């Protein structure tokens, strides 16, 4: 009886304790860690020099002198260097007739290169993977690209599979968000995210300037990432996800229509980049930062920002400057590194100005644009790779990633570095030569006339 009374008296105290232990354990398994990632690096015979770009441009017999001037100006002034990679179909002269098999071959090159390297580097087997997310915006075959990977690597039959398309350059953070939410109900999981873009079958063969830009800016690339929520693997991880914020302005017609896949007046399919794009990107960027700030910055800085913005409204803002611009929030006090999507020189400049960043903060994005170009959703990981190869990422450092995509959307996240990082990955053979003294295109003098103002 005494023992029974003792047990009954202890139970009310044990239950809350057990519940607390359960909640703590659940929270430990809801973390999202990045174990490793591997980027795609094409062979030398797929390099796209400016001279080769010029030859490809001139193969389009529908272009007149104004269009050729416009394209050469875009190529020379893009900030893209001489060693980026293009798809075999375009380099081989099939840009007007690339087949489905060409597109699948392009994806296979990226997928299998990065996945083989990821599994080799981490020591995990494809059979260990419990979730797979694949994002390629411009190619959606049947069976899906995710099924193609599962077949190649003979993955388990109960794997959780997601195949994303049409998400644009911001798709990799969308995939990370999906994995983060999946982890909440699946403890001790391993998830692989694969991101790339189909360029060859989506080459634009018409002559509208707003659709020709995509041919100049995008390059072949890709990345595979291995993520986990298993606390037993904490000693092996590179980064821990602290927060992720997604902003989508698809309900706004101007934002929706500024960046989309469509046919021109002659029936040629391509990717349209409208004049409204900078305005839509700015609007999404500022709103995203407004939502991100409370999750990253201390209360004192938030209160200072609110007081300052209210003061601006009362006394009026300088012409052309929004009174509530988040650019006045200093993220540099809480974030050591900025991983900005290298969508183009103008994109990097605009984000840098909006965040008040220094030249050194923008170096990883500029150098990624120069060496690998805009590889769509995988670009952020080349930027992160540059930081790691330069040995800039130290334990406890925080990395802010910012990306943009059709829709229109802006996604951002903050990672915390879990150990000192120094893997060079695809930068290994050239990191010592970066940053170069000059990144000016070597053909700028030869094509000096393209710097004249064009439409």
Image: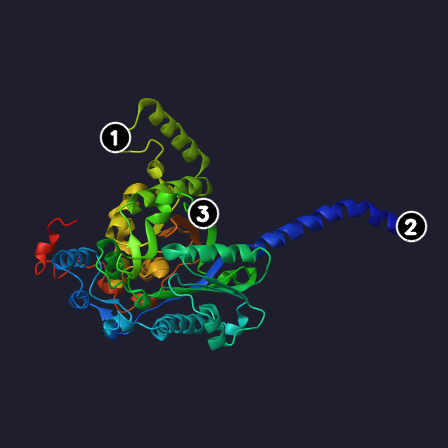
Nearest the viewer among 235 and 218 is 218
Is disc 3 placed on a helix, strand or loop?
A: strand
Determine if residue 90 is in view. Answer: yes
Q: Residue furthest front?
A: 266
Label located before the other in sequence (2 or 1): 2
Sequence-first disc among 3 and 1: 3
* Position of residue 253 measured from the top left corner of the image (x, y, whole percent): 38, 44
Q: Which residue is mark 3?
A: 245
- Front residue of this view, candidates 331 and 323: 323
Q: Are marks 2 and 3 in contact (CB under 8 Å)?
A: no
Residue with the mark numbered 2 = 1
User: For the residue labelled by badge 1, is the local secondary structure a helix, a strand or a loop?
Assistant: loop
**Residue furthest to the top:** 315
Give the foreground label among 2 and 3.
3
Of badges 3 and 1, the one in the foreground is 1
Q: Name which residue lies at 52% across and 63% down.
A: 233
Residue 158's x, y, as percent?
58, 69
Horizontal and vertical percent position of residue 130: 55, 67
Q: Is residue 58 left or right of residue 20?
A: left
Mark 3 crowdedness (10 Å alpha carbons): few <14, some 14-19, many ≥20:
many
For the residues labelled 3 and 1, the Cα–Cα distance comes to 30 Å
Dot 2: element: loop
Q: Which mark is residue 346?
A: none
Residue at the (8%, 58%) spot, across then down: 445
How far apart are the alpha carbons under marks 2 and 1? 83 Å
């Amino acid at each position: 009886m005494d023992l029974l009374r003792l047990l009954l008296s202890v139970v009310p105290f044990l239950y809350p304790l057990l519940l607390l232990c359960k909640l703590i354990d659940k929270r430990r398994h809801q973390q999202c860690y990045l174990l490793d990632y591997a980027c795609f690096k094409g062979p030398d015979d797929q390099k796209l020099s400016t001279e080769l770009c010029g030859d490809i441009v001139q193969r389009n017999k529908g272009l007149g002198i104004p269009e050729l001037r416009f394209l050469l100006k875009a190529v020379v002034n893009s900030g893209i260097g001489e060693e980026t990679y293009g798809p075999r179909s375009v380099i081989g002269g099939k840009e007007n007739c690339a087949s489905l098999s060409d597109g699948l071959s392009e994806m296979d090159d990226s997928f299998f290169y990065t996945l083989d390297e990821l599994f080799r580097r981490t020591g995990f087997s494809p059979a260990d993977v419990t979730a797979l997310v694949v994002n390629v915006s411009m190619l959606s075959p049947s069976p899906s690209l995710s099924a193609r990977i599962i077949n190649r690597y003979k993955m388990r039959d109960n794997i959780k599979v997601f195949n994303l398309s049409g998400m644009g350059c911001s798709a990799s953070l969308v995939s990370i968000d999906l994995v983060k939410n999946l982890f909440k109900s699946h403890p001790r999981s391993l998830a692989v995210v694969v991101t790339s873009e189909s360029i060859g079958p989506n080459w634009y063969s018409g002559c509208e300037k707003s659709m020709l830009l995509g041919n100049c800016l995008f390059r072949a690339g890709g990345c595979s990432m291995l993520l986990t929520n298993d606390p037993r693997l904490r000693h092996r991880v590179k980064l821990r996800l602290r927060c992720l914020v997604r902003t989508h302005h698809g309900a706004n017609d101007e934002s929706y229509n500024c960046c989309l896949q469509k046919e021109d007046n002659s029936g040629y399919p391509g990717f349209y980049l409208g004049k409204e794009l900078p305005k839509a990107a700015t609007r999404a960027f500022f709103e995203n930062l407004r939502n991100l700030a409370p999750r990253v910055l201390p209360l004192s800085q938030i209160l200072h920002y609110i007081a300052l913005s209210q003061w601006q409204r009362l006394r009026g803002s300088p012409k052309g400057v929004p009174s509530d611009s988040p650019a006045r929030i200093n993220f540099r006090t809480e974030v050591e590194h900025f991983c900005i999507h290298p969508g183009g020189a103008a994109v990097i400049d605009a984000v840098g100005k909006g965040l008040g960043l220094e030249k050194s903060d923008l170096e990883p994005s500029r150098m990624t644009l120069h060496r690998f170009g805009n590889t769509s959703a995988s670009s952020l990981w080349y930027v992160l790779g540059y930081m790691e190869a330069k040995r800039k990422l130290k334990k406890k450092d925080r990395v802010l990633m910012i990306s943009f995509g059709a829709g229109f959307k802006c996604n951002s996240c903050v990672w915390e570095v879990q150990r000192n990082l120094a893997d060079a990955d695809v930068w290994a053979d050239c990191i010592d030569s970066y940053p170069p003294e000059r990144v000016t295109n070597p053909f700028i003098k030869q094509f000096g006339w393209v710097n004249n103002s064009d439409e």
